[in-house]
Amino acid sequence: MINGVVMQTLLDIFRDRGLVEMVSDEVLGAELSKGCVPFYTGYDPTASSLQIGNLFAIVTMRRLQEAGHKPVVIVGGATGMIGDPSGKNAERNFLTQETIEQNVAGIRAQLETYLDFSSSSSGAVLLNNYDWLGAFNFIEFLRDVGKRFRMGEMLAKESVKRRISSEAGLSFTEFTYQMLQAYDFLHLYKTHGVRLQIGGGDQWGNITAGIDLVRKVEGAQVFGLVIPLVVDGQGKKFGKSEGGTIYLDPNVTSPYQMYQYLLNSDDASVITYLKYYTFLSMDDIRQLEETISENAGARQAQKTLAEEVVRFTHGEDGLQAALRATRVFFGEAIENLNDADLRGIFADVPSVEVSREQLAAGIGAIDLLAMTTLFSSKSEARRSIQQNGAYLNNLPLKEIDRVITIADLASETTLVLRKGKKNYSLVRITG
RNA sequence: GGGGAGAUGCCCGAGUGGUUAAAGGGGACGGACUGUAAAUCCGUUGACUAUGUCUACAGUGGUUCGAAUCCACUUCUCCCCA
């Protein structure tokens, strides 16, 4: 309190936004107000791309960075080889050194779009814990680190208890995981002054292990902050759609797919997502919340969420591509588009090839439709046309005996066929 | 080893000699409605050279003008008694 005014700390602001599941000590609020607190979070390099589920932590890091705190991102080159038992039912397969290196490179590139990696005092750094953990020999590790750990505490960890009593059991390798991660915290404290670890709820055991180790070895207080688990209206983990996981890499998950996933957020969850994933003010978010009760059908909140996140991830160009793909996918006539546009929009759509001579000679609509994966027989194709369910370049195919020719190309080499609302197939001409 | 029941379209399930490409339900697909939701409603759901033709009711053979329906054998499934 200063002059009778309650100062709101960054931690309070985070709380208002719902970003805090747990903190190790309330003193963290004051610490964050005093000055730069280097903090870290870690990622396992199990894939070359992060997924949208990881984005929450990244956005949270960004918030901290904007408040003047320095992000230290660890990619678990060493711990990734061990496998974190937290929240997992079985030990995972070891990754090869080569795969891990590839994945580390991919993750680094992605983080650079979200965080400021400049050399300023709060500039982010990315480290690979293989660089220090890999150098250890076993005896040294036992003497310097292992001695600080008590079996009772280690066995009491939820992740360990659950796995030990499970069918799969727990290997010694996995059991030591918490020591490695705790050592990361100690190492970062010593080398970068890191005093805060953030992570998801399943990391709580590992985080506290690190806090304890730093206290024992250095006599210093460091902190942990756990962000909430993000789930959708059905309680399912955020970021998994029927089509699979939503990745941040546009080559794996197109901006359009990400946009669609976010746009389809249910009304009950969208406000929470806006708080987690966007930098909109709480006032703006409250206004969007009102639009839901006023006119839920407009889905203003969902649109805003999708726009903000896609722009943040893929830039303005990526967002525009997603919006254009959305318009086309949802029925806008396909015209004035070139091959490159279509390739972007229909990146995930199957295609068949037809020679230029064949198309020049004309192909019956039914025959052409039956060649695609859309229909498994000519009868189906015929039926679909009769039911007004077949479209050429998003215009209904009305006549059964329609002949399709070169003149029908939507772009230089492509015809767009559609069944029903949004099942597409492309026909490309060759030669 | 003895006795009994059964095998139908994507699935379940009617049908026991003649408009049966096969009732009904589910699913799926299309359409309407809608918020790219849910529900609801309508239509479709063997193939093809398409108002017709061909292929289909476990398999093979037979009876018959005509069979998913009757007979024989084969294969498989289930149940009961030893």
Image (cartoon, coloured by chain):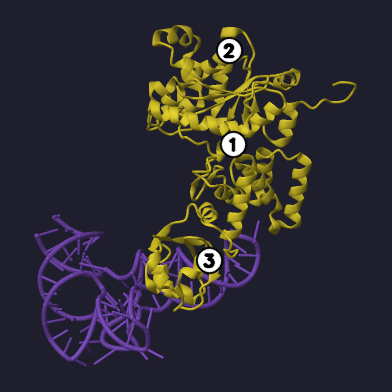
Chain colours: A yellow, B purple
| B49 to A134, vertically: above or below | below
Question: Foreground: B7 or A198?
Answer: A198
- Closest to the camera, between mark 1 and mark 3, is 3
B18 displayed left or right of B40? left
Location of residue A208 by image quarter? top right
Q: CA–CA distance between discs 3 and 2? A: 60 Å
Q: What amino acid is labelled 2 in the image? A: Thr
**On-image quarter of the N terminus of chain A:** top right
Please tell me which of labels 1 and 3 falls first in the chain.
1
Q: Which residue is mark 3?
A: A393
The label on residue A191 is 2
How far is disc 1 from disc 2 in space, using C-alphas?
27 Å
Label 3 vs label 2, nearer the camera: 3
Residue occupying image coordinates x 54% and y 42%: A237
| Front position in the image: A165 or A77 | A77
Q: Residue at x 56, y 40 (%)?
A: A52
- Confirm whether residue A214 shows in the render: yes
Q: Which image quadrant is residue B65 in?
A: bottom left
- Residues at marks 1 and 2 touching, judged by CB atoms closer than 8 Å: no
Label 3 marks a residue whose chain is A
Q: Is residue A343 left or right of residue B78?
A: right
Earlier in the chain: of badge 1 and badge 2, it is: 1
On the image, the x and y values in percent for residue B81 come to 18, 58
Kind of residue indicated by mark 1: Leu
Residues at marks 1 and 2 on the same chain: yes
Residue denoted by label 1: A55
